[in-house]
Amino acid sequence: MHNRLMTVMVTAGLLLAAALPVAAHHSFSAEYDSNQPVKVTGTVTRVDWQNPHIWFFVDVKDAQGKVTNWGFSGGPPGVLQRRGINRDALKAGDVVVVEGFRARDGSNNASGGKVTFPDGRSVFTASNEDKAPR
Amino acid sequence: MSRTQTTVGMCAIVLAVAAIAIVSAQSKPAGQIPRLADGKPDFTGMWDNPKEPGSRAPATVFDKAKMAPFVPGGEALFYEPRTGDPRHDEPRAFCMPSGFPSAFLGPYPVQFIQTPQHLVMATEFMNVTRIIPLDGRPHKTDIEPTFYGEPVGRWEGDTLVIEGRNYKRWSLDDWYYQNPKEYRMHSEAFHSIERLRRVDADTISYEFTVDDPKIFTKPWSVQWEMKRHPEWEKTGLFEMVCNENNRCEGGKCKDSK
């Protein structure tokens, strides 16, 4: 149960009730578990600005100092670019809070519909990535 | 009533009549829509995906209440049970084709390019393109069915009617149908009928009819509309290659490093 010790809040219920289904190239439920909301704080290590969804990776440290790298799926690059969001929106070294829903395989991957910086700025909040917690 | 008052009153009436005339002229959108040299309405442009009229959400779930009754055995053909095998349950998660109309219902722009002979309907989603002849030619009878079928267009006045046949049995669902037990499919008898009418410079009225005699007793329709987005013409459609980095296909994620 290492995951419970991490700075990860898995809080089913309210978040789920507020979730809006917005799709991309697949049915959300095929890949992510809407009963497993995820919220982490960490440091961006890499951004893959690729189709069909961008992916970004975040190092998350638990209470014991153990670091786990999480992968988050964002919107499709074209959809984001059309809204003026380009690959510079998120860079390695950025500290972010990410909210999403965990991958069905239980790995440290999730949809990452909402990203918030320490100064309160948000990116991808209206993203077309799957279910964005609101 | 003084002469001044009368003059003011007359002016007000004239202005009111003029205003009514202007409003009336503006409410005749048919005269304002772009047309090709042959006089046909020109659908060329960048359009948002079809939505329910007045809706901003990409809500295009086929509402059961709008569907026709099933023929005997049709219900079993329509509802495909999910089995737990993601390749069966959601082949689109493996970058398989979405089929029609599903591929055009996602949150991606659709570009129309029209000539007197063809309408090209291209969506950014996986760069799916339909090349639709507009001469009302008969559908082919000797071809294999396909995911996107064989669309043929014809004009009924200013309405473009597109009939599609020769579809492979495939999902009818858009991406928003989340029932965990089953999803919904059309048969190879699926016959799609689209009726597109440009109601003003920025709006296409889009009626979509499902005719599938192996499943339904009669055709049934939903009403959508498409809104023009000229600002998207600056960039055009972006490339969208589904297999480039489909990290969690079917719910199994690849290692990040």
Image: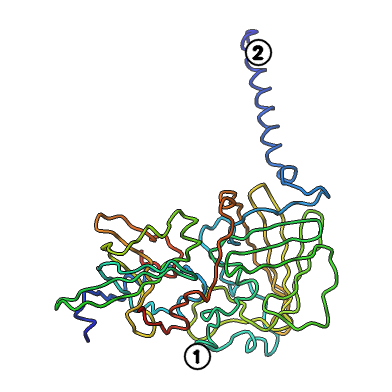
Q: Secondary structure at mark 2?
A: helix
Q: Quick one: which residue is furthest to the left in this view?
A: A64
Q: Is residue B209 left or right of residue B84?
A: right
Q: Residue at x 47, y 67 (%)?
A: A22
Q: Quick one: which residue is furthest to the front in this view?
A: B257
B132 and B63: which is toward the camera: B132
Q: Is residue B89 left or right of residue B144?
A: left
Write down the chain letter for disc 1: B
Q: Is residue B204 left or right of residue A118?
A: right
Q: Identify the residue under disc 2.
A: B6
Q: Residue at x 38, y 57 (%)?
A: A88
- The answer to which quarter of the image holds residue A38 is bottom left
Q: Is residue A58 above or below residue A87?
A: below
Q: Identify the residue under disc 1.
A: B85
* C-alpha span from label 1 to label 2: 82 Å
Q: Is residue B2 above or below residue B73?
A: above
Q: Position of residue A58 (x, y in %)?
A: 29, 71
Marks 1 & 2 on one chain: yes
Query: Which amino acid type is marked by label 2?
Result: Thr
Comes first in the chain, label 1 or label 2: 2
B62 and B1: which is toward the camera: B62
Query: Which amino acid type is marked by label 1?
Result: Asp
Binning the other alpha carbons within 10 Å of mark 1 as few (below 14), some (14 to 19) or many (20 upward) gives few
